[in-house]
Image (tube, rainbow, N blue to C red):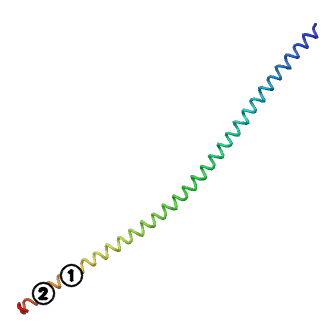
Amino acid sequence: RRRQEEQARAERAAERAAREAHDRRAEREDADAASRRAGDAVDRAREEVSAAERRLREAHAELARAERELGTAREREHTTAQALDRAEREARDAAREADRTAGRAERRDPRD
C-alpha cells in the first residue's frame, strides 16, 4: 500500500512537472514571438530613423542652397538699388542741365 501511495505521489508529481514543462514551453513560445515582434519593430524604427536622417541631411542641404540664393539675391538687390540711385541722380542732373540749357536758349533769342 505504501508503494502504491508513493507511486501515486510520483505519478502526480510527474504530471505536475509535465504540466509545468508544457506551461513553460508555451511561455517560451510567447516570449519568442514577442521577441520577434520587438525585433521587427526595432528594424522598422531603425529604417525610419535612417530615412529621417536622410531627409534631415537633404533639408540641411536645401537650407544651405536657399541661404546661398538669399545671399545672392540680397547682393543683387543692393547692387541694383545702388545703380538705381545713380541712374536717378544722373536723370535729375540731366533734367536740370536740360532746364538750364533751355533757359539760356530762351534768354538768347526767345523766337528761335
Give the CA separation, mark 2 to mark 1. 14 Å
x 82%, y 19%: residue: 16
x 93%, y 7%: residue: 1
x 35%, y 74%: residue: 79
Q: Nearer the viewer, residue 44 or 91?
A: 44
Compared to residue 66, the image places residue 16 above or below, namely above
Residue 93 numbered mark, or none: 1
**Relative image position of residue 28 (x, y in whole percent):** 75, 32
What amino acid is at disc 1?
Answer: Asp
**Relative image position of residue 5 (x, y in whole percent):** 90, 10
Mark 2 vs mark 1: give the one in front.
Answer: 2
Task: Say if mark 2 contacts mark 1, CB within 8 Å.
Answer: no
Residue 42 numbered mark, or none: none
Is 1 left or right of 76, judged from the image as shown?
right
Compared to residue 24, the image places residue 75 above or below, namely below
Is 8 left or right of 103, judged from the image as shown?
right
Residue 34: quarter of image: top right
**Relative image position of residue 6 (x, y in whole percent):** 91, 12
x 35%, y 70%: residue: 77
Q: How packed is label 1: few (under 14 Cα within 10 Å), some, or many (20 or more)?
A: few
Q: Work out whether mark 2 precedes mark 1 in sequence or the reverse, and give the earlier one.
A: 1
Q: Nearer the viewer, residue 33 or 96?
A: 33
**Relative image position of residue 75 (x, y in whole percent):** 39, 71
- Label 2's element? helix
Q: How packed is label 2: few (under 14 Cα within 10 Å), some, or many (20 or more)?
A: few
What amino acid is at disc 2?
Answer: Ala
Residue annotated with mark 2: 102
